[in-house]
Image: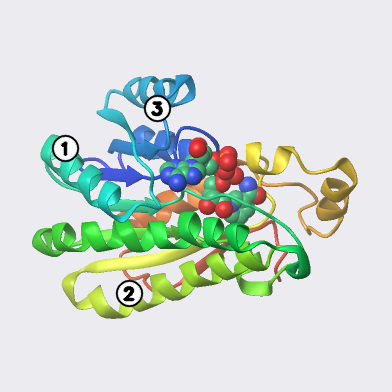
Amino acid sequence: MTLLKGKVALVTGAARGIGKAIALKFASEGADVAFTDLLIDEAGLATQKEIEAFGVRGKGYASNAANFEEAHKVTGEIVKEFGRIDILVNNAGITRDGLMMRMSEQQWDMVININLKSAFNFIHAITPVMMKQKGGSIINMASVVGVSGNAGQANYAASKAGMIGLAKSVAKELGSRGIRANAIAPGFIITDMTAGLPEDVKTEWAKQIPLRRGGTPEDVANVATFLASDLSSYVTGQTIHCCGGMNT
Ligand code: NAI
């Protein structure tokens, strides 16, 4: 399949989980894929190999997305090596849940920096590249809780609401330059991030989902592929929910 043939993608936090599924789906559609993660460990090397197995270029870069300088540095390296960047997926993210009364300043700062500031860092670094190319697609990984809020996740929900506001603002600022920006709001997706939740919490979530199942990373990757490709050439500033109908 060739929906993304000739395009270069950068996916943050893609050694595993949803980011990895996106990187592999993009590769299967013909894109060259650069990705970042905190470390390029065994999981990262496996991701790189699996990308290359599609006959495209793939490379993992160790980089802390929350760090402004590191994000700019790695973006420069990727442009040098891959020649361009057409697609940016701001996927890196963490949770540090806790009720407001007990949430530490560190819990708040970590989640805002890794989930939201990271997207600012990469959009800031990539905007001149995409402006020069006169086009690009930016995808921010938000969450349904960024739209609805969630008890015990004030930091996470705020960061994800920020991802939506950021995508909308960038869409307005850069639309005239051919650069699109959208957000994906996944619901309950089965990855390392959610695997550790207690069984009763997972059962409760599933009951509230009209499609009666948690999503897969591939479900989210399919939406990302639509937003990355020219199939969505008239879609910008939007948030697509990928939640089995949970937030309806
Ligand atoms: P995950 O924990 O499986 O993978 C996240 C990846 O990001 C990991 O490889 C991790 O090392 C990397 N990462 C963490 N901090 C980083 C940093 N500072 N710099 C670079 N990389 C970093 O998580 P999952 O589930 O794949 O989540 C991916 C994104 O999707 C996150 O933004 C998450 O908030 C979002 N999301 C996930 C949902 C779910 O149910 N799993 C639901 C809604 C949104």
Residue 189 is situated, as x and y percent measured from the top left of the image, at: 66, 47
- State the SS at label 1: helix
The correct choice, above or below, for 17 with respect to 200 in the image is above
Determine crowd level at label 3: few under 14, some 14-19, many 20+ residues with C-alpha closer than 10 A: many
Which of the two discs, 3 and 2, labels the residue nearer the N terminus?
3
First of labels 3, 1 by sequence position? 3
Please report the residue visible at 49 percent of the width from the left and 57 percent of the height from the top. 115
Looking at the picture, which amino acid does disc 1 mark? Phe
Nearest the eye: 68 or 6: 68
Query: Which label was assigned to residue 40?
Result: 3
- Vertical position of residue 220 compared to residue 237: above or below: above
- Viewer-closest of 175 and 111: 111
Q: Amino acid at mark 3?
A: Ile
Q: Say whether residue 51 is left or right of residue 195.
A: left
Q: Are marks 1 and 2 in contact (CB under 8 Å)?
A: no
**Looking at this view, is 101 or 209 the one in front?**
101
For badge 2, the amino acid type reads: Ala
Query: Regarding mark 3 in the picture, which secondary structure is present there?
Result: loop
- What sort of colour scheme is used for the picture? rainbow
Between marks 3 and 1 in the image, the one whose residue lies nearer the viewer = 3
Label 2 sits on residue: 171
The residue under label 1 is 82
The alpha-carbon separation of the residues under discs 1 and 2 comes to 25 Å
Question: How far, Cα to Cα, is label 3 from label 1?
Answer: 18 Å
Q: Residue at x 29, y 37 (%)?
A: 34
The reply to whether the C-beta atoms of the residues labelled 3 and 2 are less than 8 Å apart is no
Residue drawn at (82%, 51%), measured in percent from left and top?
206
